[in-house]
Amino acid sequence: MKDKKALLVIFLTIFIDLLGFGIIIPILPDFSSNVLHVDVFVIGLIGGIYSLMQFIFSPVWGSFSDIYGRKPILLVSLAGNVISYFLMYLVLSGVFPSVYLLVLSRAFAGIFSANLSAAQAVISDITSPQERTKGMGIIGAAFGLGFVFGPALGGILSQNFGYGVPIALSGFFSLSAFVLAATIFKETLPEDIRKQNKRDFKGVTFINFRGVKDVLSNKKVGAYIIIFFFITFSFANIYQTFVLFAERADTFALNKLYVGLLLSFLGITSAVVQTTLIKTFKMKIGEEKSVLIGNFLVIFGLALIPLSISLPFLLIILTILGFGSGLNNPMVLGLISTNVSRDEQGSVLGINQSLGSLARFLGPLWGTFIYRFGYAFPFLSGGFFMLLITLFSLRFLKKN
């Protein structure tokens, strides 16, 4: 890789920021249900509004990163996160316990959540096509590690010190990531490419329908993006409902601490795969077959969660699920990136991230809606949708 220092800064920035994000995962459903007393579908909306705003704004940030560079967009994103955590703190600390302010804080965070698309674009700047999947795996590992420590911290702190303390810590982590990016990170997109992209820029489109259409019209890249969308949607079914499932008296009756630890265990499994096995799978099996293997593991993992009869069995299922998720996500991202020219990396990855955000909005909404008919349905339906996209993948790969 051409710039290991930039890679390290991106890794630390994403890790610190996702650590703060991971902290709130076991807290929001619990707080919304037990303190604000809102309907389960509203819990899905609170969890999903962040991703809806990402869907609308990610293409904008992706295009801006091609014009103004990766660093300014990264800094704007992190500053917005700090403000959003402050607003959320007002709600969860009891200063202003309002559903509307909570939704607003999550929406604000989603608007300024440009760090992922900017980070992916940085990886494309500093890696060769042969190293691209490994680079995406490093970002995935930062995500995974953020989810390793974040949910556990959130569960421990909220169980012992109340809801406000972990949110304040999340804001501090985002502020730390901002300082790190501002002081150490150096721009990775050459000035000549930025100038050319600025000359070609035709204005801001918040929901870039034309860009989505153009990207999807590319047969190979479009297929990979569709696969990534359904992988994300299927997994997002359980974002809010896993906490509700684990806390139910007729399942495991776990408190926030243990739910956070379970989610952290899932993150550990994913991170181990993305840091130690990605290169081996790519070399020995290939990216496309690795995606299929990851998909099948996620199918079984999701479908078997509601059939768990004990905590040890649930840990085995979460291991399968984490292994599959750690394998298929970076492989698909690597396939997308290696099939796109350098000057389009930010835009295409931004569109892909935007569609992924839409999937992360629709997934919790669907999951909390179908949860009303039984706690098993979000997991079973997630496995079903994953099966459908796997069958599509098999057919697509056979033709190519």
Image (spheres, helix red, strand yellow):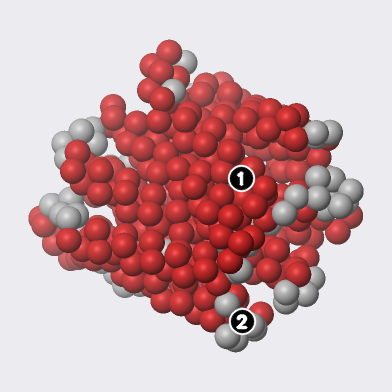
Mark 1 is surrounded, within 10 Å at the Cα level, by few (under 14), some (14 to 19) or many (20 or more) other residues, namely many
Q: Position of residue 30 (x, y in %)?
A: 70, 63
Secondary structure at badge 2 equals loop
Q: Which amino acid does label 2 sit on?
A: Gly
314 or 71, nearer to the observer: 314
Q: In this view, does 196 lie to the left or right of 390?
A: left
Residue drawn at x 86%, y 59% is 372
Residue 391, quarter of the rendered image: top right
78 or 23, nearer to the observer: 23
Q: Mark 2 points at which residue?
A: 94
Q: Position of residue 343 (x, y in %)?
A: 24, 49
Asked if residue 294 can be seen in this view, the reply is yes
Q: Where is residue 58 in the image (x, y as percent from the top left)?
A: 42, 62
Q: Residue furthest top?
A: 284
Q: Which amino acid does label 1 sit on?
A: Leu
Residue drawn at x 24%, y 58% is 180
Q: Name the residue under label 1.
A: 261
Asked if residue 295 can be seen in this view, the reply is no
Q: In this view, does 136 lie to the left or right of 182?
A: right
Q: Which mark is residue 218?
A: none
